[in-house]
Amino acid sequence: MMMKAGWSREWAESRWRLQKLNESIAWTTAMAIGVYGEIADAMAILVGGRAAVTSGIGTRGPRLPPKDTPERARIDAARERGVKAKKAEELADIQAGGKGSGVWSEKELEGIRRSGKFPDDVEWHHDPTVANRPDRAADPRVVSPVRGGRKGHLRDGHKGNWRNPKE
């Protein structure tokens, strides 16, 4: 820790501790808002020694816990439960004679009824995204099929931006 001329050691230590506390508050706020809160892409940044909250496309920082952590594994497992439950609902509706979510052609509906499998170009999209609302990852009501594979998912599910905070 460097001291400027005329600063007492106690004052310099207090300022250093305050700076570290602000950094800690900024990170905690980023995680609380960005991962768990309603404002999905919000994150705290240190500005002039104070924590400030910003939101919108282009902000940087994690929206999900790091990979290979227990918390991320729980979120990923919840995501898979949500997709699995939605697939089961969709399949049950189609096999009962319904049209499912309506993204299937008549020929595809026949194939799904016969095989019990969905076309290869289907991805399952969460709206709101799991990064924005991990608490809803297991809810099949927020999951829907998107056509076009990964590119279609990006284009139609996320409007061309995986970090789209509106989704």
Image (cartoon, grey):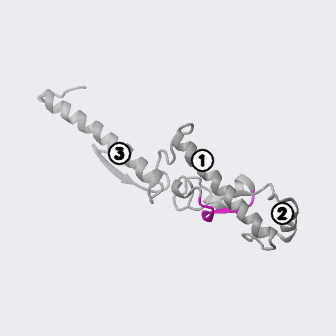
Hey, which residue is sitting farthest bottom in the picture? 98
Q: Indicate the quadrant containing the C terminus: top left, top right, bottom left or bottom right.
A: bottom right
Q: Position of residue 15 (x, y in %)?
A: 21, 36
User: In this orientation, does residue 165 appear?
Assistant: yes
Q: Is residue 153 visible?
A: no
Q: Earlier in the sequence, mark 1 or mark 3?
A: 3
**Image x and y of residue 86, in percent:** 68, 61
According to the picture, the residue beneath numbered tag 3 turns out to be: 26
Q: Callout 3, which amino acid?
A: Ala
Residue that appears at 27% across and 43% down:
49
The secondary structure type at the circle numbered 1 is helix
Rendering coords of residue 92 (x, y %): 76, 66
Q: Which region of the structure is painted magenta?
A: 139-148
User: CA separation, marks 2 and 1?
Assistant: 26 Å
Q: Residue at x 20, y 30 (%)?
A: 13
Q: Would you name the residue on which mark 1 appears? A: 76
Which quarter of the figure is the N terminus placed in?
Answer: top left
Return the mark for residue 112: 2
